[in-house]
Amino acid sequence: MAKLADAVPDARTTGKKWIKILEGQSIYLAETLPTQLAGESSVDDFLALHGKEETVTTPEAALNIFSASGLRSIFSVSSPNADFTLHCLERPQISFPSLLPATPSYSPFGVPTMNDWQNLWAAWDMVTLGMIPREMLHQKPIDLRHICLFYIGHIPTFLDMLMSKALNEPNTEPKNFTLIFERGIDPHVDDPEHCHRHSEVPKKDEDWPTLANILGFRDRVRARLLKLYGDLQSGTRPLDRHVARMLVLTHEHEGWHVETLLYMLIQRAGTGTLPPSGFAVPPWEALAEQWNATVRPPSTPTVTLGPATIILGHQDCEGDDLKPGITEIIDGHAFGWDNESPPRAIEVKQIKMDWRPVTNAEFLAFYQDHKEVCLPPSWVETEGGMEVRTLYGPVSMTVAQHWPVLTSYDGLLTYAKSKGGRLPTEPELRLFFDTYEVGHGGGANVGFRNWHPVPAAAGQEEFSGRGSNGGVWEWTSTLLSDHEGFYPTKHFPGYSTDFFDGKHHVALGGSYATIPRQAGRRTVRNFYQHNYPYPWVGARVVYDA
């Protein structure tokens, strides 16, 4: 056991105090702080949830127990005969527990609780106030988006505007924030002058509101939301589906923007962006050594899928929200965005699909012979070789070679064609995920379990092929467009319809920075322009049978 404990990288324990917890077949090293009272310790939370008579028998069970008690595994080492595992744990600044299972009276995709909001606010504040230096507030990490300060003002403004609209109340002061912060931009990559309706923002730094004014506004808007929840709980204001949907959309909108801001900030990681505070820096060398030793190829190169009928979407029409007999039905209802409804049956022909997304190493070998393909912005070309961006700064390709590559649809389509394949349609990828993806509760790398991708794990025979894709969204060849029964949202006009432009492709799944309720709802559809290379989106190759 002592030798196994020695395998935990020394860098993880420098300047920290650790205690060992022996639980059945697992040993945990948990970080403690000298100022913590015993009753407030995450370790005590862990012990309360996981009694000594229990045994953690699967990796995903361990991860879920850690998440439920506010802990996170930094590094783990299995014994030579794999009968127990040593986990090095920390209590991070933010943690998202796994979703609870749905029941007739409860949906994990229903109205967010105040605890859900508090967790999300902690993540948002950590990113915006802890990772963006003051000198970066008026900078654009990427040219096709606004300056960082815009997003700090956009989130509370959006929440305030949708609350006012749903409740028929005035906006929070200062009301002119709606003119600046209402909506961001997504200009055409090949013609940046072409853009949907958006806010007109100041052109000079000195004309923007100050950070202090924006944060004061944020606090007033959050207080307004807390009061609304208090009124709903006391019965002072009845909850109908119209207000419930507003709460869902504003919550998930903030979830989207945590990830959007992070994929912008990663472009400056190591040259401006600060690493996530309250999280240990990954032991890259030890992780690389472990991945190189343990990552195995799938049991078979591809998996055969179909023919099958797949159901896309769910029954959740916003147009029904105020109808008698429907408006009061909230408990147990799964809310979503307008492009997720209604359900529709799609036939999938027989295909063969790669078990895992294209890796950095695979795309690098392709790129070296196809320089006409753009260098993925997730990479950095240095004199010492190719590196891969992380929020802690770039790491060597040796560390990240097994991670899914993150780049544009166009680049990955060219790769797929070179292999004699193509990229999957939305129904094809949905069929694969429904059959083999394990999700957050099954140990997938979403919900900030890590702040970087990890190697994909699907395709092993002993797990019936089930596994995760490493923590990325995945491109599909399906364009975002209208479909039968589509009802455009009136809470957020243009959310989908502004991008029915023949340029935006549907992406499915979820990245390591996607909150669990968005990564876990099978009907969620993300979308990006085919030549927009910055989001955390990879792809797998599919072959026609």
Image (tube, rainbow, N blue to C red):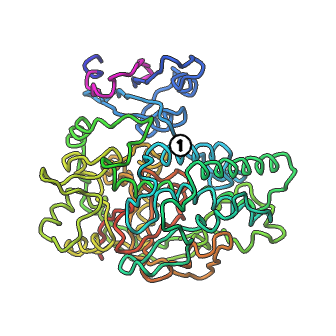
Q: Evaluate whether residue 461 shows in this view.
A: no
Choose between 342 and 288: the one closer to the eye: 288
Secondary-structure class at tag 1 = loop
Assess whether residue 84 is covered by the magenta stretch: no
Name the spot of residue 298 as percent of width and height, x first. 26, 54
Q: Which residues are magenta?
A: 6-25
* Crowd tier of the residue under label 1, counting other residues whose Cα lies within 10 Å: few below 14, some 14–19, many 20 or above: many
State which quadrant residue 370 falls in. Answer: bottom left
Name the spot of residue 176 as percent of width and height, x first. 66, 65
In this rendering, would 248 be left or right of 430? right
Q: Tell me: residue 253, above or below residue 318.
A: above
Name the spot of residue 249 as percent of width and height, x first. 63, 61
Q: Evaluate whether residue 363 shows in this view.
A: yes
Choose between 276 and 201: the one closer to the eye: 201
Q: Can you identify the residue that label 1 sits on?
A: 96
Q: Residue visible at 51% across and 23% down?
A: 43
Q: Residue visible at 54% across and 36% down?
A: 68
Q: Residue visible at 43% across and 38% down?
A: 277
Name the spot of residue 357 as percent of width and height, x first. 31, 60
Choose between 518 and 192: the one closer to the eye: 192
Q: Quadrant of the C terminus?
A: bottom left
* Residue lying furthest right: 236
Q: Tell me: residue 170, above or below residue 67.
A: below
Q: Amino acid at mark 1?
A: Phe
Q: Residue visible at 72% across and 57% down?
A: 173
In this rendering, would 353 be left or right of 528? left
Q: Tell me: residue 181, above or below residue 395.
A: below
Choose between 357 and 82: the one closer to the eye: 357
Assess whether residue 15 is covered by the magenta stretch: yes
